[in-house]
């Protein structure tokens, strides 16, 4: 990776983003355009995110071709871009500096009062929560989030202050590039085992990530996570740890938690006193996300009242227990959950609705399914009714463990599980299975969301006219 990314932050610099419509690239492209850079880029297909960038002054192409790369100062790519991509190959052929997306974002954040959010689970939601809190408190932050935030009507917020609140990515180790003022660490779990040899290696990566916090900075961490407690013991003496907990003594603790179908309430015990919080999203894991965001915001000097308003107004991020509509009077919910721990949390939220649940799960990556097959089996057997489809490969070559492998495991212990590999067949079967009053819960990080959206459109088209 090029380590001179800071030189490309200046107004007037010409940047080409390969994959500009993606959830990681799109917000960064917007922020750089707002800073005065000349932005162009491409994505595999036409989509709404490209239209929004064009409205912001960017030149965007649908499809990839070497001719798209004009007279630019730098070529920005992500880990999802293959070296065989014709634009990437053209940039290298012409000697254009090639910068990883994370490197450009880190250069931006490291020059600001940066707040980073990392963790195997919850980082998109916690980042969005923190960004909304900073905004409500008048700090006018720049924010880069890995999901669409309805409160911002975007994946980002282009602020005018020196504050930046960003989601960082441990999946490829790129979060080690960041040197924030405050680092939020939510949890460590066995994931991205295509990149890491095991969870011990992930813990070591978090140790390096938190070691880069600026002198005088702060680490907000989950004291209920044993591995994070170990990592925090290695912090330098000029970095302050702030512990968050749902169950034990900590600097910030959530008490009196009351979970409701579509929200929650709790009290935050914090330095300086306790205060109540009403949260606009359900789930115990979201209480934890909010607690960490509150701690980061208080560390930045935010008053309590704006944080309370932000929590009450926060109604989630797209693809996080997102209600899309209904079909045959069954509620359609779309969720990004693709790890056993995430699926467990989402199934608990669905159960709290008090209605019959039909879960539809698409595994994401053959490597993840193979590494966590026992864990997937254990958590999915808890689903009331379950339909499985084939693995979304995310570019991986199929291995010995497939969606059918998971089905065979589950069918031995679950009387209401089906395996429907093809998504078109899946859509038809879900239509047949949907009963009035059901919750249709679509789970996965791949293409399963398209089926949920298709079903919601079908349901809307069959609604009687008002």
Image (cartoon, rainbow, N blue to C red):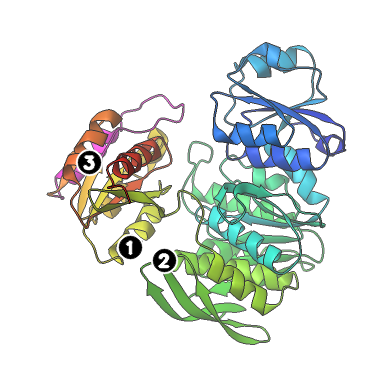
Whether the residues at callouts 1 and 3 have beta carbons within 8 Å, the answer is no
Whether the residues at callouts 2 and 1 have beta carbons within 8 Å, the answer is yes
Q: For residue 430, which numbered disc appears in the image?
A: 3
Crowdedness near tag 2: few (<14), some (14–19) or many (≥20) residues, C-alpha within 10 Å: many
Q: Magenta stretch: give its range.
A: 388-414
- Magenta: main secondary structure equals loop
Question: The residue tagged with tag 2: helix, strand or loop?
Answer: loop
Crowdedness near tag 3: few (<14), some (14–19) or many (≥20) residues, C-alpha within 10 Å: some
**In the displayed structure image, the side of residue 361 where residue 320 appears, left or right:** right
Q: Residue at x 73, y 66 (%)?
A: 218
**Residue 247 visible to an observer of this rendering:** no
How far across and how far down the image is residue 126, in percent? 57, 60
In this view, 245 is above or below 371: below
Q: For residue 11, which numbered disc appears in the image?
A: none
Q: Residue at x 59, y 62 (%)?
A: 129
User: Going from the N terminus, do you reach mark 2 or mark 1 first?
Assistant: 2
Single out the residue that lies furthest toward the left. Answer: 415
Question: The residue tagged with tag 3: helix, strand or loop?
Answer: helix
The residue where tag 1 is placed is 348
Between the C-alphas of marks 1 and 3, the distance is: 21 Å
In this view, 246 is above or below 91: below
How far across and how far down the image is residue 356, in percent? 21, 59
Q: Residue at x 79, y 43 (%)?
A: 107
**In the displayed structure image, the side of residue 410 where residue 347 appears, left or right:** right
Question: The residue tagged with tag 1: helix, strand or loop?
Answer: helix
The residue where tag 2 is placed is 283
User: Going from the N terminus, do you reach mark 2 or mark 3 first?
Assistant: 2
């Amino acid at each position: 990776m090029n380590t001179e990314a800071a030189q490309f932050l200046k107004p007037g610099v010409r940047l080409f983003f390969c994959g500009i419509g993606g959830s990681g690239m799109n917000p960064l492209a917007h922020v750089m355009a707002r800073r005065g850079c000349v932005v162009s880029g491409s994505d595999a297909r036409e989509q709404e995110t490209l239209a929004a960038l064009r409205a912001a002054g960017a030149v965007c192409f649908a499809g990839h071709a070497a001719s798209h790369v004009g007279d630019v100062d730098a070529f920005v790519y992500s880990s999802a871009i293959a070296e065989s991509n014709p634009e990437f190959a053209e940039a290298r052929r012409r000697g254009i500096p090639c910068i990883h997306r994370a490197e450009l974002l880190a250069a931006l954040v490291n020059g600001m009062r940066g707040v980073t959010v990392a963790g195997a689970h919850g980082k998109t939601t916690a980042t969005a929560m923190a960004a909304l809190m900073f905004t409500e408190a008048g700090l006018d932050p720049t924010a880069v989030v890995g999901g669409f935030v309805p409160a911002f009507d975007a994946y980002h917020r282009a602020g005018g202050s020196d504050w930046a609140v960003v989601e960082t990515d441990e999946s490829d180790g790129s979060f080690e590039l960041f040197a924030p003022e405050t680092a939020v660490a939510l949890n460590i779990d066995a994931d991205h085992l295509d990149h890491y040899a095991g969870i011990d290696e992930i813990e070591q990566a978090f140790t390096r990530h938190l070691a880069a916090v600026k002198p005088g900075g702060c680490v907000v961490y989950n004291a209920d996570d044993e591995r994070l407690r170990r990592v925090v013991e290695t912090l330098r003496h000029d970095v302050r740890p702030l512990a968050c907990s749902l169950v034990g003594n900590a600097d910030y603790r959530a008490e009196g938690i009351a979970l409701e179908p579509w929200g929650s309430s709790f009290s935050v015990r914090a330095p300086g006193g306790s205060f109540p919080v009403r949260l606009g999203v359900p789930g115990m894991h979201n209480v934890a996300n909010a607690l960490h965001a509150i701690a980061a915001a208080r560390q930045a000097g935010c008053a309590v009242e704006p944080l309370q308003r932000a929590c009450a107004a926060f109604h989630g991020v797209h693809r996080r227990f997102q209600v899309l509509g209904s079909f045959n009077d069954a509620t359609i919910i779309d969720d990004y959950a693709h790890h056993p721990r995430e699926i467990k949390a989402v199934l608990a939220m669905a159960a709290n609705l008090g209605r019959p649940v039909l879960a539809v799960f698409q595994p994401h990556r053959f490597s993840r399914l193979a590494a966590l097959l026992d864990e997937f089996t254990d958590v999915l057997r808890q689903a009331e009714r379950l339909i499985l489809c084939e693995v979304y490969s995310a570019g991986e070559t199929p291995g010995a463990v497939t969606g059918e492998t998971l089905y065979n495991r589950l069918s031995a212990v679950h009387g209401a599980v089906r395996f429907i590999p093809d998504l078109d067949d899946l859509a038809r079967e879900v239509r047949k299975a949907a009963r009035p009053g059901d919750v249709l819960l679509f789970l996965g990080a791949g293409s399963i969301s398209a089926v949920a959206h298709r079903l919601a459109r079908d349901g809307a088209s069959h609604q009687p006219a008002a």
